[in-house]
Image (cartoon, coloured by chain):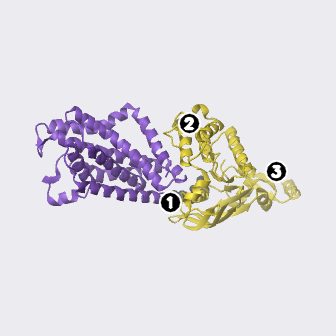
């Protein structure tokens, strides 16, 4: 459904994405992880026609994102990292314009449905300027799914949300997954990717350094982690079996902590950076 | 063709602005000052080409005000929406064409330009200049708004910062307001300046608005040059939108 071949983007001489080859199947939820500046947003923006690639190509449902941009736009829904709602309009007006831009039938019913989902029914006629950050993020996601796109781009859809609202966003992603929507999700919350995504890719400095299911990636670095405190610095050691982990832990006199590995360990091991929570 | 949502967005904003008295007042104040200062103050007892100065200056200020209001509204709404609020990205990921965006924006510029300059005509009528009778006046008036709304789109999409649209206005729009026959006929100027002014659209808007306001025959060449400006600037606008942000 989403395919890139040698996709590359330079901003002047800043390399944002280098030779990305991705193949995302129909109905797949794909998570793009990576530290700040890794190139996640750039990838999403090239796929949703906002940014022209420097070289390489990408297609969505067989349509070239550069040459057939207008056809691509009919298929996709976009929730950008940066809140780009029209703050001078009300929430309802934002959704109405979106429906009109997509020539939607049954627009008004869908608006009510989404406002209710976003918990904004009683604020629908207030200017978006007066909404909290979380309210705006919910409206943004609601707008992206409004016209029932086949392919959905969610660039950090849960950033800055309270735990309840995050779960609400997860629920809608799971619901869309059941309906067979193809989703490209970027996130800094590892557990989110682990929970929602069929496969994840890890980007670092514009390069894809790992690709696979969360299980596969964890198997690659080791299933068990021993955390120990050495002179005030937490160290992580990864082991393939529980036995090896115990053996190591027993040699240590100080406090150690054994647990199963998660995607964050994969991430840290591969990028050498800790994800900011 | 799906320009309606883009037009509707601007109209929703415009409607909200109209409810704001401060905004209404500031739209009216500058051209009214010109009208009072030039039409009633300076122009009292003066006549140009056999007509009272008031009759001369009212269509001129109408041309000027429709120009600046169409241009400024569009250039501002686009540059701020593109660079600051990123709201234009919503259009750019939706299945609307550059032509749709162009049409939606310039039609809203026309509404805005007609609104502001009709206040001038009303004020002029109150001071005794009367209303235009010739339907050609309306045509030229709309044409003028369209041309400068197109310029507004171009400058809004080319701007690298919000100040850029003001720079374009200071170097291009404002000089036209003063030299293209708004306040005095260009006939008395040296020939080389006259020749230069003759290729600017506002010169012809002034010429055609004034002659139709006075019930005289409008020069076809003026209409033709304005139409040519519209076609070219519309086309350039569509190209600019297509290339922006990519
Ligand atoms: N418009 C631009 N002009 C110049 N450089 C840019 C532009 N957009 C992105 N970059 C650069 O491209 C690189 C990748 O940025 P990108 O926004 O894709 O990262 P990201 O993975 O989304 O990061 P974050 O997690 O902070 O959102 C960075 O080095 C960034 O500085
Ligand atoms: Mg990003």
Quadrant occupied by the N terminus of chain A: bottom right
Q: Which label belongs to residue B79?
A: none
Q: Is mark 2 within 8 Å of ligand 2?
A: no
User: Chain for mark 2?
Assistant: A
In percent of width and height, residue A178 lies at: 74, 49
Q: Which residue is mark 2?
A: A131
Quickly name the residue at label 1: B246
Q: In this figure, which residue is indicated by the disc labeled 3? A: A259
Q: Which chain is purple?
A: B
Left or right: A221 as drawn, with respect to A33: right
Proximity of marks 1 and 2: CB atoms separated by less than 8 Å = no
N-terminal of the pair, mark 2 or mark 3, is: 2
Disc 2 from disc 3: Cα separation: 41 Å
Residue toward you, A136 or A190 = A136
The number of numbered discs placed on residues in the rendered structure image is 3
Q: Residue pushed farthest right?
A: A243
Q: Which chain is yellow?
A: A
Whole-angstrom CA distance, mark 1 to mark 2, is 30 Å
Q: Horizontally, is B103 left or right of A177 in the view?
A: left
Do the residues marked 3 and 1 share a common chain? no
Disc 1 with disc 2 on a shared chain: no
Q: Nearer the viewer, mark 2 or mark 3?
A: 2
Label 1 marks a residue whose chain is: B
Of all chains, the one bearing label 3 is A
Between tags 3 and 1, which lies in front? 1
**Other-residue count near label 2 (Cα within 10 Å), few / some / many at <14 / 14–19 / ≥20:** some
Specify whether A110 is left or right of A89: right
């Amino acid at each position: 459904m989403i395919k890139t071949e040698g996709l590359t983007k330079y901003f002047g001489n800043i390399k944002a994405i280098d030779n990305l080859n991705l193949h995302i199947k129909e109905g797949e939820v794909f998570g793009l992880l990576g530290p700040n500046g890794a190139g996640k947003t750039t990838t999403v923006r090239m796929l949703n026609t906002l940014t022209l690639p420097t070289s390489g190509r990408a297609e969505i449902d067989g349509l070239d994102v550069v040459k057939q941009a207008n056809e691509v736009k009919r298929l996709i829904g976009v929730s950008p990292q940066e809140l780009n709602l029209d703050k001078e309009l009300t929430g309802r007006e934002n959704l109405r314009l979106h429906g009109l831009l997509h020539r939607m039938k049954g627009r008004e019913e869908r608006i009510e449905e989404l406002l209710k989902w976003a918990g904004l029914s009683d604020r629908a006629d207030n200017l978006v300027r007066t909404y909290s950050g979380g309210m705006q993020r919910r409206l943004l996601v609601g707008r992206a799914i409004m016209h029932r796109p086949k392919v959905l781009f969610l660039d950090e859809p849960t950033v800055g949300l309270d735990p309840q609202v995050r779960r609400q966003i997860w629920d809608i992603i799971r619901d869309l997954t059941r309906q067979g929507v193809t989703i490209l999700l970027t996130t800094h919350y590892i557990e989110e990717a682990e929970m929602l995504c069929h496969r994840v890719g890890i980007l670092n400095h514009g390069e894809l350094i790992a690709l696979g299911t969360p299980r596969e990636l964890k198997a690659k670095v080791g299933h068990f982690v021993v955390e120990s405190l050495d002179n005030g610095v937490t160290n992580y050691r990864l082991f393939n079996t529980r036995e090896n982990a115990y053996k190591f832990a027993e040699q240590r006199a100080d406090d150690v902590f054994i647990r199963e590995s998660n995607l964050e360990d994969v991430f840290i091991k591969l990028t050498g950076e800790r994800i900011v929570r | 063709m799906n320009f309606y949502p883009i037009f509707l967005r601007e109209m929703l904003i415009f409607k909200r602005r109209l409810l704001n008295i401060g905004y209404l007042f500031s739209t009216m104040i500058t051209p009214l000052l010109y009208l009072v200062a030039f039409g009633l103050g300076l122009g009292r007892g003066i006549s140009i080409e056999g007509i009272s100065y008031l009759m001369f200056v009212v269509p001129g200020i109408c041309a000027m005000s429709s120009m600046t209001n169409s241009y400024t509204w569009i250039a501002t709404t686009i540059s701020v929406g593109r660079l600051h609020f990123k709201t234009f990205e919503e259009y750019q990921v939706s299945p609307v064409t550059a032509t749709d965006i162009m049409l939606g924006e310039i039609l809203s510029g026309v509404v805005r330009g007609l609104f502001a300059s009709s206040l001038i005509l009303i004020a002029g009528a109150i001071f005794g200049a009367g209303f235009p009778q010739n339907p050609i006046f309306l045509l030229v008036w709309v044409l003028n708004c369209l041309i400068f709304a197109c310029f507004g789109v171009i400058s809004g999409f080319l701007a690298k910062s919000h100040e850029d649209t003001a720079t374009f206005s200071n170097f291009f729009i404002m000089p036209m307001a003063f030299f293209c026959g708004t306040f005095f006929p260009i006939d008395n100027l040296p020939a080389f300046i006259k020749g230069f002014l003759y290729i600017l659209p506002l010169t012809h808007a002034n010429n055609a608005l004034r002659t139709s306001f006075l019930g005289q025959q409008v020069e076809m060449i003026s209409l033709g040059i304005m139409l040519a400006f519209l076609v070219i600037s519309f086309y350039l606008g569509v190209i600019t939108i297509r290339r922006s942000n990519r």
